[in-house]
Amino acid sequence: MDVTTLLIGKARNVIDYFADPVFNWGRRNSIWMLHLGIKCCALEWGPFIARFDAERFGIGPRASPRHCDLMIVAGPITHKFAPKFKMLYEQMPEPKWVIAMGDCAISGGPFFDSYNIIRGVDKLVPVDVYVPGCPPRPETMLDGMFKLQELIKKRKGGYYTCGP
Amino acid sequence: MSAEEVAGEMKKKFPEADVRIPRASRLTASVKKEVLLDVCSFLKDAGFDHLSSIAGVDRAENFEVAYFLWSYEKKILVTLKTAVQKENPRIQSVIKIWEGANWHEREAYDMFGIVFEGHPDLRRLLMPEDFVGHPLRKDFKLPEVE
């Protein structure tokens, strides 16, 4: 390693050290979630987004995975949908987080012994926060969101391939 | 034409068929799979123009294919049952008689592995293409490891 590369690396470290808290503050206060309503838990986004106004915490649904930081898995993933689901996850820009919402996404729920359900979405993608319930109440969902914000604040969880 | 008259004509034409009338405007018939296409053509000509469903059933000793036919004029629901052996289950497709049998037969093939001879496009309907086994068979085991 020559001196120039070393210096650039050190400079990036210094910049990251001072800039990353700012970026992190932005990340946790503008969580855009993917509007992927897989099953009935997605109906619970209605009160969660509108009645409790998740937009005041910077949480809002976006239509394209390329705009999103967060994927809320609101239902069971079938074997047939799993490749497309992974493709959606891989299209999201980093850093990205995943919330497993409801019993179906956590463990398969009432369909745990079905032949076409993946028992737990964490077999496909890394999950940061599990929000149990069938379906979870909107307050529970907000609590899960605050847990996620704490995680981002402590720089835990999430999926990064580079950077802090 | 009432259900009794349809049953009488069926008994006259297919003496081996087991025709029953469990209740009003219902008719149940069990036929051999060799005469299935003849029975189906007869019923189509008799006015049963709607094939609402094809169901596979896993009995202990054999598979069973059930055709549910409805006549809009007569208001009669016919359940036509045919037994298929478990080893290498094959049966004639009724797609030439009722065009709508296409996806029903694909579903029965997907879930039970019953091969419908004469079907133009017999692929899996609901399960992924690379799925191994037929999930509604009684001897299907859930894969333990995903």
Image (cartoon, grey):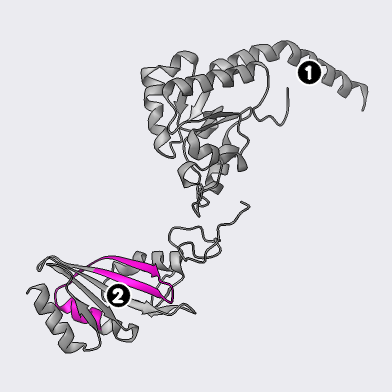
Q: What's the chain of the residue with tag 1?
A: A
Circle 2 packing at 10 Å, graded few (<14), some (14-19), many (20+), is many
Q: Residue furthest left?
A: B1
Q: Residue furthest right?
A: A2
| B103 lies left or right of A111 | left
Q: Position of residue A32 (x, y in %)?
A: 51, 24
Q: Is B112 or A28 nearer to us in this picture?
A: B112
Circle 1 packing at 10 Å, graded few (<14), some (14-19), many (20+), is few
Extent of the magenta region? B39-68
The residue tagged 1 is A12
| B121 lies left or right of A107 | left
Secondary structure category for the residue under label 1: helix
The residue tagged 2 is B81
Q: Is residue B99 above or below residue A117?
A: below
Which quadrant of the figure has residue A66? top right
Tell me the amino acid under the disc marked 1: Arg
Tell me the amino acid under the disc marked 2: Lys
Q: Residue at x 55, y 15 (%)?
A: A29
Q: Is residue A123 above or below residue A70?
A: below
Q: Position of residue A149 (x, y in %)?
A: 58, 18
Q: What's the chain of the residue with tag 2?
A: B
Q: Nearer the viewer, mark 1 or mark 2?
A: 2
